[in-house]
Structure formats: C-alpha cells, structure tokens
Amino acid sequence: MKKGFVDESVKGIENLEDAFLKLKKKKNAVLMAHFYQEDRIQDIADFVGDSLALAQFAAKTDADIIIVAGVHFMGESAKILAPERTVIVPDLNAGCSLADSCPPDAFAEFIKLYPDYKVVTYVNTSAEIKALSDIVVTSTNAKAIIDSFPADEKLIFGPDRNLGNYINSITGREMILWDGACHVHEKFSLEKILEIKEENSDAEILAHPECKKQLLMVADQIGSTAALLKYSATSESQKFIVATESGIIHQMKLKSPNKTFIPAPPNDSTCACNDCEFMRLNTMDKLYNALKYEWPTINVEESIRIKAVKPIERMLDISNKLNL
Ligand code: 13P
Ligand code: SF4
C-alpha cells in the first residue's frame, strides 16, 4: 500500500486546524472521525462516531469529498455507500488487524463448507469479504441483527471470534465462527485490570466485545464504542476502567467532565493505555495534505462494490427501523 503524504509544506502554516477548515469549506468536504482518533482530530470533525454511525453519515452526506479519519475498511464502507463521492483516508497504511485476519480466498473456501448457512460479517472486513456476505453488522447492531434471523436459521459469523462468542452467549445461538481477532482488544491484561479494580472498588469496568471472554466476564458493561460512551454518561458511577482504545476517553470526558476514566493497560508493556497504531497513523498534517492534494483516495472495483453494498444496506435498513 502507498503511504499518505508527509509534506514539509505544513511547517509554514501557523494554525493547521484553521487552514484545514478553510480548505474543507472551499472544497465542499466533510471530515468524519472515529472515536479512536487523537483528540485534535475529533475536535475539528463534522461528525465523530462508531463504525455504524460513520457508515450512516457517509450514506447521507451530500459533500463532494468525504475525509475518513479512521481505518481503511471505514473508508471502503463510505465509498461503497457513496460511490459518486471522493473518499479519502489520509494514510492508506491505516489497516485493521481484525480485517487482515480474514483473507477473502480463505473465507470463500470456509463458507463453501457450509452451503446452507447465512453469512454474517462484522464491518471490520475488506470489501471482498462484504461481497461474500448476506448481511454486515457492527458491534452496535450485531445482537439486534442476529436476533432478526429466525431461531433455526444457521449462521456463520466472521471474522471476530470474541464478538461471535459473545453474541452466541447472549442469544443462545451456535453460530459457526471464523477464527479472527483484533490485536488491540486481545492485548488487555486481565491481571492488571483486576489490580486497578482492587485499588478502585467503586470503578465500573467497560469493555468492547472484541475483548477476550475472560475480560468480558468481569466487565460491568459490554458494548460498542457508542454504547460504552452512552453508558458512561448515564451510569451513576463516577469512575470507569475503559477496556477499549483510549481515544474514546476524549468523548467520555467531554460528556462527563467530573467523572474519572482509567484506560485499561495492555499486558506486554509498561504503558498505561492501549492505542490502535493503525488509527493513530492519522495526524493533522496528513489530514491537511490529503485534502489539499485529494489523495490518497479509496477506490472499490465496481463488480465488488455492487455485491458489497447489498449486505451493508440490509444492515442500515434494519438499524434505521430499530432506531440504532
Ligand atoms: P465500534 O464500531 O464499536 O466503533 O468499533 C470499531 C472498532 O474498530 C473497534 O475496534
Ligand atoms: Fe481494527 Fe482493532 Fe484497530 Fe479496531 S482497534 S481498527 S479492530 S486493529
């Protein structure tokens, strides 16, 4: 993959945010940012949200250019839903270990083993995987969408084994699971989290369903980034241990400035939080240059896009009906 721009010319710009916002207006562009982006990017975005909300936003915008401050699959979803728009992801190296854990050829072979099964895939996948799917889900709508299938419908779920296991446990289904995972969410240290909890017995543990089962078992609340954000604002608790990418804490603090948020630590280092290095490839400099040069763009081959858009639109239809 080609990298995004690292252009020395931004050094002469006094206020990069202002320059970016002016250029954005001039080019009729919008910036949508995932909750895992650095604070500075979240603060100037037209829209900040989880994977579902970003897809819904991309499907509705009438801007000429959509800048996606997120990872590659989020840019692909936007392009699939809005093919007539220019979609930019500032650094094409912003991939996703979960999406990478599901190569299309191997997944195609896998689903052939279960010809009478419906294929449900998490949005963290490539366009090719979506093209092989009956329906796409995000962590916000996964349970509701899976509940919408008749109880005896046989389902394959991929690629996240942790989310799949979690959905099986709360729905009583026995979906066949692809064996993929997110390296960021699998890296949280249960031991260190329990130590923090012992010192902060009043804190609630919030966990994303991409975390391992052992961690989910001790969590007080499990949910998508948007669901955890909402919970942190409405819960009576004043303190939270946050077991997902630490970027979400920015919005949590904005909504609840007097509450305390402790990032859950990973098991393999001394650092205090767990960042997704792909999400963090996006910087203000790259954002500015990507918009200036309208590059790098996301393109999806039309034959793949036509197949991939159907399962995404099915997901959006159900989500809209359920007000998700
Ligand atoms: P959300 O849909 O909950 O924002 O999750 C996206 C993601 O990449 C989690 O790692
Ligand atoms: Fe992918 Fe994990 Fe990063 Fe989310 S946190 S984008 S699942 S690598």
Image: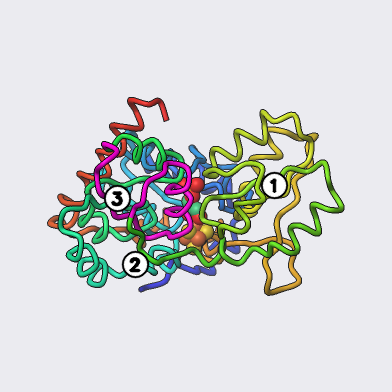
Q: Which residue is mark 3?
A: 120
* Quadrant including the C terminus: top left
Would you say 215 lies left or right of 272 here?
A: left
The number of discs equals 3
Q: Residues within 10 Å of mark 1 (few under 14, many from 20)?
A: many
In the depicted structure, whether residue 199 falls above or below residue 151: below
Q: Which residue is under mark 2?
A: 102
N-terminal label among 2 and 1: 2
**Colour option used:** rainbow
Location of mark 1 (residue): 205
Query: What is the quadrant of the N terminus in the image?
Result: bottom left
The x and y percentages for residue 182 are 49, 63
State the residue at coordinates (43%, 64%): 98
Label 3 vs 2, first from the N-terminus: 2
Q: Nearer the viewer, mark 3 or mark 2?
A: 3
The magenta-colored residue range is: 150-175
Pointer 2 local density, CA inside 10 Å: few below 14, some 14–19, many at least 20: many
Give the residue drawn at x 31%, y 58%.
298
